Image: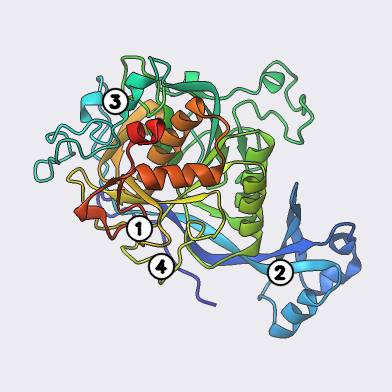
Amino acid sequence: MNSKLLSVSLLSLFISFTAQATPFNGYIVKVKEGSNFLSSKAVSSYGQITKTAATNFGTFARLETSKGLSDKAMQSLANNPEIEYIEPNYIISLHSNSKKVGTPTDAMFAKQWGLLNTGKNGGGIFSPGVAGEDINVAKAWDITQGAIGDKTIRIAVIDTGVDYTHPDLKSQIEVNVAELNGKAGVDDDGNGFIDDVYGYDFANKDGDPMDGHGHGTHCAGVIGASHNSVGIAGVMSNVKIVPIKFLTDAGSGETIDAISAIDYAIKRGVNVMSNSWGGGEKEQSLLDAITAAETAGITFVAAAGNESSNNDSTASYPANYDVSNVISVGSYTAAGAKSSFSNYGVKSVHVTAPGSSILSTYKNGGYASLSGTSMATPHIAGVIGLLLSKEPNLTPAQIRERLVNTSVKTDKLKSASLSGGRVDAFRALTNK
């Protein structure tokens, strides 16, 4: 079993973000419908059930053991008629390669080269950029006649949580009114989650998805920071962000919590899921969750990864899952070239977006500049939100095809993705 061992390191001020799978914590067991296996005495001969996830696409449990299961025990469980499958419960954690450059407090749209690249705002003295190498969203905003999205569009940020009190985000958060006006400690809306006013935290199993890390808040800002003359501007000004936390403030999480997060997003009726995490081996449980999102008509945007590798030959999950709703996103620089860290692949990476030195919201009401395919991913989630606000009946497969076909082809990105270029919001919305 070849799992990737990737730890979070903070070397000086150099930090970057894309979650990677690390060694597993026990096993995920998916039981068949109507099975009593989880409550049977037979379980104790293998280990202890310490966590369960009852989703719309099946019941899963974490089976913990002191030394791991032998091949014989694994085979015995796999052959059990009450079990659908068993697999490692991988740990997912944040991996970095960007530079945090501070927390400015003034209006900063002029520094957002990914939205409007002037050729001088690329993020550094030695990398000023090339004018026009952006997602062309300002032109797309013109044709939306000031709406810049739609408050009925819900985008789930599945990550380390979101600072839902941030001045640039608090008006953009989807609020569960029944829980807000209900009683503390009570599941007022009957959805199975207590006090999930602003979303849910599957890492700590509570209704508070506050971000103590910063990564999820950064992604949320790229998608939908308010256009309020303060701080930055998101790709959308009208959107509802659903914070869903499964990665801890230390930047790690488990697959069983990731599938619970996806199931929760489905239940909340989101249109898009933004997923700036990945790595490790293929997992049937995660595939089941993404397929359930596909059935629900939800687009699953996934970071291609930050290993500078070819995803066509070395798969990176969840970006490489072959499901029609998955859109894999690579990163490019302000100069319009593939970011040095970005994974690529003309078959398996669908599109590219700005991901180097991206300024956005950060934890504790701050702002920061970060790099990674993690930052490229919410740019695409935001463009999809704009597209759905104009054409709400598009399927995830149609959205992916639209983004690929309307991308601006460039020599610098021709081998980076299937699109052979950079996503253009205006062309996507006009289908040109």
**Which mark sits nearer the N-terminus, 2 or 3?**
2
**Label 1 vs label 3, nearer the camera:** 3
Query: Mark 3: which amino acid?
Result: Ala
Looking at the rendered structure, the secondary structure element under dot 2 is strand
Badge 4: few (under 14), some or many (20 or more) residues near its Cα, within 10 Å?
Answer: some
Residue identifier under label 4: 312
Q: CA distance from mark 4 to mark 1?
A: 14 Å
Q: Is residue 130 left or right of residue 284?
A: left
Badge 1: few (under 14), some or many (20 or more) residues near its Cα, within 10 Å?
Answer: many
Residue identifier under label 2: 86
Residue 21 place in picture, x, y as percent? 50, 62
Q: Residue lying at the far front in this picture: please name it.
A: 432
Q: Is residue 247 left or right of residue 116?
A: right
**Residue at 51 percent of width and 57 percent of height:** 318
Residue 368 place in picture, x, y as percent? 30, 35
Residue identifier under label 1: 306
Residue 195 place in picture, x, y as percent? 69, 28
Q: CA distance from mark 1 to mark 2?
A: 29 Å
Query: Mark 4: which amino acid?
Result: Asp
**Label 4 vs label 1, nearer the camera:** 4
**Label 4 vs label 2, nearer the camera:** 4
Pick whichever, 279 or 43, lies toward us: 279
Corner quadrant of residue 175: top right
Badge 3: few (under 14), some or many (20 or more) residues near its Cα, within 10 Å?
Answer: some
Residue identifier under label 3: 138
Corner quadrant of residue 315: bottom left
**Residue at 49 percent of width and 41 percent of height:** 399
Quadrant (top left, top right, bottom left, bottom right) of the C terminus? top left
**Label 2 vs label 3, nearer the camera:** 3
